[in-house]
Amino acid sequence: MDDIDRLLLTRLAADGRAPYAELGKAVGLSLSATKRRVDRLVAEGTIRGFTALLDPAAAGWALSASVELFTTGTVAADRMRRDLAAMPEVVSAHSVSGAADTLLRVVAADAQHLERVISRVRDLPYVQRTSTVLLLSDLLTRPAPLSPDRAPT
Amino acid sequence: MDDIDRLLLTRLAADGRAPYAELGKAVGLSLSATKRRVDRLVAEGTIRGFTALLDPAAAGWALSASVELFTTGTVAADRMRRDLAAMPEVVSAHSVSGAADTLLRVVAADAQHLERVISRVRDLPYVQRTSTVLLLSDLLTRPAPLSPDRAPT
DNA sequence: GTTGAAATGACCCCCTA
DNA sequence: TAGGGGGTCATTTCAAC
């Protein structure tokens, strides 16, 4: 991981479809050296993949919510991961500090749909209760940049 | 927006670098018809862009947190958007239902960095107080799929 | 469809440990 | 002298007209 890698990551985060020749010009490498770098970054897991950023409304998601989970006793993380991964509306899940045990981000087509999703979460045997806040207007949503201490010089 | 568009979106969400020829084969269109579709989806804003998904740890983000903001009186959304957008560590911001007014997702290189970021947020003149929960282990993080009622048949 | 551009993989070179 | 990283070239694949 050197400055060239960091610059490639910055560029690819801004434009995931940038051609290798263009990336190469930006970092001062040939096309094939650039492709080798990118391939390595993918193989190492530094780049987890490439995706199109979709407008949530166009994708059919009118509503999203942040859902806190309060669970009973100890739950195997793998079990919970599997259960939550089975619900496509759950887009992220983290264990958290504080009173709640787990924090979910969920999307839904409408209020009824959201209600059904939360029901299914609440019906997981190890979930005691949930607390939901609706995400109203979207002020800001963007991919994380590179950390300043990793920014290319 | 028809089934072909929806299938294209599904494919591009899964692989943002997929060549048009491959996408075209999947949807039964020629390369150029496929490119026209994708260009239109980008122009319409359905596709907001293409990006590389980076491993947060590799990007230098060891910590992330969910931060509730309690604000004084009415704050212009644009003002808040601008203020928050100026902090690269703030990756999302939504106004929310419930006691808090705004919910942020922030990333930080370490605990000191997180503390500085929260300080800067708290120092915004219209922010009364904040409430932070640390995101510990990452159970699940993935892009939102298409809503079932929009899924290609 | 044809033609230029891009990506891929094979091969060799250089530097360094 | 083995391995990492880079360049060049030939071939295949992709994209623009």
Image (spheres, coloured by chain):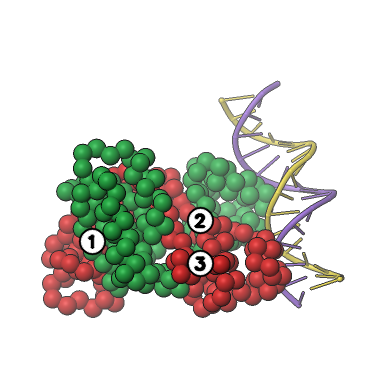
Chain colours: A green, B red, C yellow, D purple
Look at label 3 and name its amino acid. Answer: Ala
Circle number at residue B52: 2
Give me the residue at 33% from left, 40% from top: A77
Report, in whole angstroms, how far the alpha carbon at label 3 lies from the one at label 1: 26 Å
Look at label 2 and name its amino acid. Answer: Ala
- Please identify the quarter of the rendering in which residue A104 is found: bottom left
Report, in whole angstroms, how far the alpha carbon at label 1 lies from the one at label 2: 30 Å
State the image coordinates of residue C3 (x, y, percent, origin top left).
84, 69
State the image coordinates of residue A68 (x, y, percent, origin top left).
24, 54
Look at label 1 and name its amino acid. Answer: Thr
- Please identify the quarter of the rendering in which residue A114 is found: bottom left
Residue hosting label 3: B151
Q: Nearer the viewer, mark 2 or mark 3?
A: 3
Q: Chain of mark 1?
A: A
* Label located before the other in sequence (2 or 3): 2
Give me the residue at 55% from left, 67% from top: B152
Q: Nearer the viewer, mark 1 or mark 2?
A: 1
Q: Is residue A23 visible?
A: yes
Give me the residue at 34% from left, 67% from top: A113
Residue hosting label 1: A132
